[in-house]
Image (cartoon, rainbow, N blue to C red):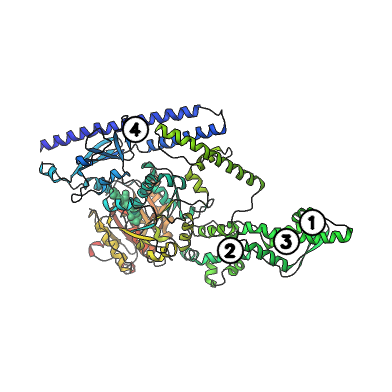
Amino acid sequence: MPEQVTTRQDELTLERGRVAVRYARLDALRREKEEQLARVRRTGLQGSVQNHSERDAFATLYEDRLAQLYAVDDRLVFGRLDLDPAHADPQGSPEDGQRYIGRIGLTDEERGRLLVDWRAAEAGAFYQATALQRQGVRRRRHLMLRGREVRDLEDEILDPQMLAAGEASGESQGALLAAVTARRTGHMRDIVATIQAEQDALIRGRLPGAVVIQGGPGTGKTAVALHRAAYLLYTHRERLAKSGVLIVGPSDGFMRYIERVLPSLGETGVVMRSLGGLFPGVQGQEESDPRVAEIKGRLDWAEIIANAVAQRQRLIPAPRKLVVDGTTLKLKPGKVRKARDKARATGKKHNKARATFVKILVRELAEQLKERLEKSAGSSVNRDYLLEDVRSARDVRIALNLCWMPMTPQRLVEDLLTKESTLRAAAPWLNDEQVRLLLREPGAAWTESDVPLLDEAAELLGPMPESGRGATSQTQHERNLENARATLENVHQTLADMGVDGVVDAQTLAAANEPTQTRHSTAEQAGQDRTWTYGHVVVDEAQELSPMQWRLLARRCPLKSFTIVGDIAQASTLGASRSWAESLDPVFADQWRQESLTVNYRTPARIMRWAAQVAREAGLQVRQPEAVREGEHEPRLVCRPGERLQDVVAQQLDDVRTIAPQGLAAVIVPPSLLADTVESLRARHGRLVDTTPGPGVDIVVATARQTKGLEFDTVVLVAPELIVAQSHGVVGDLYVSMTRCTQALRVVSTAAPDDLPAGLTWGPERRH
Ligand SMILES: Nc1ncnc2c1ncn2[C@@H]1O[C@H](COP(=O)(O)OP(=O)(O)OP(=O)(O)O)[C@@H](O)[C@H]1O
């Protein structure tokens, strides 16, 4: 035994030295880039526009590279492959036949390979090789670092000859188990060191087309989706750096939970948005009534919005008198109809087609004016001089606006949702109850289910007519873009000569030249532009999306290159689909494929069995994923009819926190109990309690909906019967809540056991 300990110590010492070499190279590169950046900035503001563009292009490049070099500091290196000679790096590495895998690729001064980026093809074997299919790998070594320090290592021997030579095999579960049992912080961590083979195959899947990844709770769907985004950006950088990748999640809380994963993988160029944030300038809040969300999610809204727009192109029932410069003219119904038909026939959007409508009628009115003036003056008048008089006359403006008003999407949707007659006219098939549910007070905050309606409206209305200033700046923008393109040809050659990697595109550079704007990256520009089309879209918790939300997303990526992850059984919205085909066929026809993930890395098996039982009792078809560990703590149902609910909650929370004293606990409540529970627990625990995870927060109190996608060490789930009732009988929310913990679960209720959702009370060991 002492012999083995010594060997292991030797290996650890060896690896510490080698890892230190890689960090030294990282530090050297940072210094180098910092100096280059400082030098570029020092070049000052003199010179031509072209010089500025070049300087800015270099500066952007160095800044991006520096951000990446700083982002990968934590656990830079995590793996080593020992290879058969035939598979060794042709480029060579300082340690012959050994390949180190890390967050980014690094080479030394002699261009020897110090570190292989985990996304490179040569790193694939680290995740995929098995004893049966070695892919040239003799040994796979996991290096476990904390910060820069190598704390431990773990070997997996795949080559039988090495085993025969006395090397211990090891199943390499240690790194994985350490990762899945680690304390939760409220922020998702990357899984780059322990990606499993079935996950890796999905991460490296091809770019075109739509893939939906179905998996039960905790199977790593979110992790896979994010690592796939990083992989695609690395592998298809030329294409995706210009068009960008959009990542969509269910809520802002969820987006905060995942926001650090991609930067830790060295990627910052993605646009991340919750469903409520997909329309620039609007932050839609959660729709409080699920029935309203369901109605607004129906595909009917494409027709309702189209009707509403068409109804803004009005006819007049009888001739209307208009005074222009003291002369009375007549706006005739037949002429208005003709102008409307012609404007519609242009096929342009409402705000643009309006110009045709106005032009025709102004011309017609000018003709009338000409005739009148000629009659009274007895001499001929040039109609062209009269056009401006007619156009700017107050009566004319009012009359034409009433017929064809330029309109913002916000105004159109606001009118629909606040004026009963407008709503009924656009959607005559809605019944009284539906109309009652939809109507709201003017000025009410936008909700996330309004967002696709606004987008639909924007699609049909088009931008508002541009002011003169806007038009000029558009021309200026085009000029800048042209200039940027010319510059780039020059710059890319210089960069290539210098051996610097990275991409700057013309859009980014053009934005840099626009003095009134702050400089925006591709991601920032994309996020602010509704009509931006992305190269790839990642959708998480996709089972919740309504048909209207899918319609919006399809518009954001006409190439239909999507990674969609979700779990049909976790659906909790009223209109959620019962199958992927129901959701995806209307958008992707047969151009999508389904994959699945089968192993739960979060929830212990003993908790998962209980959750699956509850789901099945409610008629959900759940395929219980195999859990990586059984777990140490039996989940408990604490049913105390007649007691004060908040007392039981407080007591169970204290109890469960002893299991993971440093950990993150969640108290998951039905919406009706949120405020009371926060108040009661704040009175006991003060600032440790909050409604979202954050620094200094040990206890998160939230509804099931708000905890979707998140995870905690321990969970106290309160009043399951109310959670189901307040989701209108849908059991998805309860199922989600039961699967959020990594260690221990308590389900607390003061209702009679018979009133609890089916499946919760089975197994006498759960009654306490
Ligand atoms: N290969 C892995 N190595 C280490 N941890 C992993 C691995 N795969 C998943 N995990 C961890 O398991 C937990 C669950 O992952 P994730 O949130 O991606 O699952 P999910 O399928 O999206 O869950 P849900 O649908 O229940 O929200 C996370 O903490 C994640 O980091």
* Dots 3, 1 in contact, CB < 8 A: no
Q: Quadrant location of the C terminus?
A: bottom left
Mark 2: which secondary structure?
A: helix
Q: Amino acid at mark 1?
A: Arg
Q: Residues within 10 Å of mark 4 (few under 14, many from 20)?
A: many
Q: Amino acid at mark 3?
A: Leu
Q: Are marks 1 and 4 in contact (CB under 8 Å)?
A: no
Task: Tell me the CA gap for discs 1 and 4.
Answer: 74 Å
Between the residue at mark 2 and the residue at mark 4, the CA separation in whole angstroms equals 57 Å
Nearest-to-viewer mark from 3 and 1: 1
Who's the residue at 62% across and 53% down the image?
464
**What residue is disc 1 on?**
383
Three-letter residue code for mark 2 = Leu
In the rendered structure, which amino acid carries the disc numbered 4?
Leu
Spatial CA distance of label 2 from label 3 is 28 Å
Q: What residue sits right under mark 2 in the picture?
A: 416
Q: Which residue is mark 3?
A: 361
Q: Of label 2 and label 4, which has the lower sequence position?
A: 4
The local crowd at label 3, few if under 14, some if 14 to 19, many if 20 or more residues have their Cα within 10 Å, is many
| Above or below, comparing residue 758 to residue 350 in the picture | below
Please report the residue visible at 39 percent of the width from the left and 67 percent of the height from the top. 729
Q: Residues within 10 Å of mark 2 (few under 14, many from 20)?
A: many
Q: Nearer the viewer, residue 542 or 187?
A: 542
Quadrant occupied by the N terminus: top left
